[in-house]
Amino acid sequence: VHQDGLAHISQLADRFVRDPNEVVKVGQKVEAKVLEVDLPRRRISLTLKES
């Protein structure tokens, strides 16, 4: 799959995140887990949570 994915702010950490910049920075490479692939809408949902 050559498609960008999106991690909702609620999926960035196991704790409450007020500002995504607390967890990630622009251009930072991260490892994420795929939560859902929505082929009709061409969307990939990701999580950065450990659990």
Image (spheres, rainbow, N blue to C red):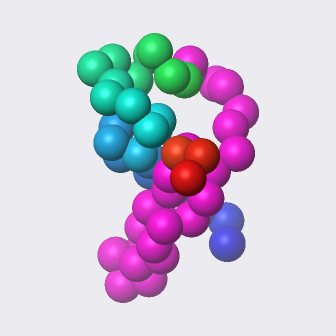
Foreground residue among 19 and 15? 15
Residue 42 location, quadrant: bottom left
Instruction: Name the quarter where the N terminus is drawn.
Output: bottom right
Q: Which residues are magenta?
A: 25-48
- Give yes or no for residue 35 being in the magenta stretch: yes
| Identity of the residue furthest to the left in this view | 18
Q: Position of residue 34 (x, y in %)?
A: 56, 65
Q: Residue at x 34, y 25 (%)?
A: 17
Q: Position of residue 27 (x, y in %)?
A: 64, 24
| In-image side of 34 versus 1 (left or right) | left
Q: Residue at x 61, y 59 (%)?
A: 33
Q: Position of residue 28 (x, y in %)?
A: 67, 25
Q: Residue at x 33, y 18 (%)?
A: 19
Q: Is residue 44 above or below residue 9?
A: below
Residue 20 location, quadrant: top left
Foreground residue among 40 and 10? 10
| Identity of the residue furthest to the bottom in this view | 40
Foreground residue among 24 and 38? 24
Q: Is residue 11 above or below residue 26?
A: below
